Image (spheres, rainbow, N blue to C red):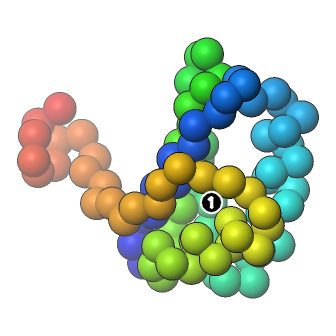
Amino acid sequence: MPYLIVEYEYDPPITDERLIGAADSLAPCLEVRGITKLRSWVSSDRRRGVCEYRAADAESVREAYRSAAVGYARVWSATLFEPGEFPDDG
């Protein structure tokens, strides 16, 4: 199952309350589509964020976000390279 990345842009910066609300809204929409959330990052200034998922395809992630009425900037598929794997040795 591919990795999917969801990017966010927040203006004004996102609050903990908004993050929790978005996660609560998304959870059932992700579950019904068989999408697994792996991890999330929020920038120190709280203006950008990224979430990583395992899902069948990018469109299923977009559908989950639309159903939950949670905004996003971009959704794209990715390949994970662990340290020491191609394309670098880092």
Q: Position of residue 6 (x, y in %)?
A: 52, 54
Q: Position of residue 80 (x, y in %)?
A: 31, 55
Identify the residue at image location x=54%, y=61%.
53
Question: Which residue in the structure is indicated by mark 1?
Answer: 37
Q: Locate the C terminus by quadrant.
A: top left
Identify the residue at image location x=78%, y=63%.
69
Asked whether residue 42 is in view, the answer is no
Identify the residue at image location x=48%, y=55%.
74
Number of numbered callouts drawn? 1
Identify the residue at image location x=72%, y=25%.
12
The answer to which of 24 and 11 lies nearer the viewer is 11
Q: Quadrant of residue 89?
A: top left
**In the rendered image, the vertical position of residue 73 relative to residue 68, given as above or below:** above
Q: Position of residue 76 (x, y in %)?
A: 40, 61
Q: Quadrant of residue 43?
A: top right
Q: Position of residue 59 (x, y in %)?
A: 51, 78
**In the rendered image, the vertical position of residue 16 relative to residue 86, given as above or below:** above
The answer to which of 11 and 40 lies nearer the viewer is 11
Task: State the SS at label 1.
Answer: strand
- Disc 1 marks a residue whose amino acid type is Lys
Q: Locate the N terminus by quadrant.
A: bottom left
